[in-house]
Image (cartoon, rainbow, N blue to C red):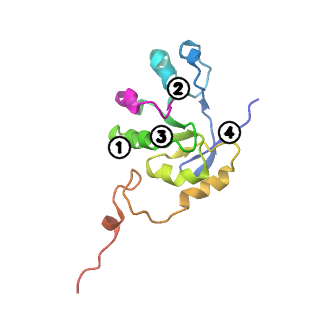
Amino acid sequence: MSEVRYIIRDREVVADDWRVLPAIAERAAAALPDGKLIVPLNVWLAQTDALTERKLPIGIWLDSNQDAAEVANVVNSFAVIAVNFPKFADGRGYSIATLLRSRYGYKGELRAIGDVLRDQLFYMQRVGFNAFAVRADKDIHDALKALKDFTVTYQGSVAEPRPLFKRRRIPEAA
């Protein structure tokens, strides 16, 4: 029996009922296991027909060097899109998330996976992530607190497109 994994989804720690398949080159042509799967982009591209016929919802994951435009025309057919952060300092996933939400109109779960640490979560939510698979050696409950690290933001973002000056009420002149 496998151990229950937990993620942060919509500001709550919840059990993760999805299985993220690792990126193995041979997997593109291999048979896929049962259950709710988040498959690498290369698997999706190689097995689109078989994955579309599955009765369970399907998710994909993009690596930080992959282009979200490859799935732009089917983006809302995925229950989950995960973006891999191969290392903490790789910020390309932020741009991918922004594109998925703002340019391609993705409305489903957008999950950060890989080297995801507490320090990143607040900023990840600003670009559109609503789910986070925090690195296994970190405390997920402590990471959850990061989503409330700041109460006011100045710049607009995917989460709040209006900059602060447009959100503030100006008192009317007497």
Q: Is residue 121 above or below residue 54?
A: below
Check disc 3 and give the amino acid type. Answer: Gly
Residue named by callout 2:
40
Would you say the residues marked 2 and 1 are in contact, meaning their CB atoms lie under 8 Å apart? Answer: no
Closer mark to the observer between disc 2 and disc 3:
3
**Residue 102 numbered tag:** 1
Q: CA distance from mark 1 to mark 3?
A: 14 Å
Which tag, 4 or 1, sits closer to the chain's start?
4
Q: Secondary structure at mark 4?
A: loop
Residue flagged by tag 1: what amino acid is it? Ser
**For the residue carrying disc 2, how many other residues have a C-alpha within 10 Å: few (<14), some (14-19), or many (20+)?**
many
The residue under label 4 is 5
| Residue identifier under label 3 | 93
Check residue 33 for magenta coloring: no
User: Tag 1's secondary structure?
Assistant: helix
Residue 67 point in image, percent of width and height: 41, 31
Residue 107 in sight: no
In magenta, the rendered stretch is: 61-75
The residue positioned farthest toward the left in the image shown: 174
Against 40, is 82 above or below?
A: below
**In this rendering, the label closer to the viewer, 2 or 4:** 2
3D distance between C-alphas at marks 2 and 3:
15 Å
Viewer-side label of 4, 1: 1
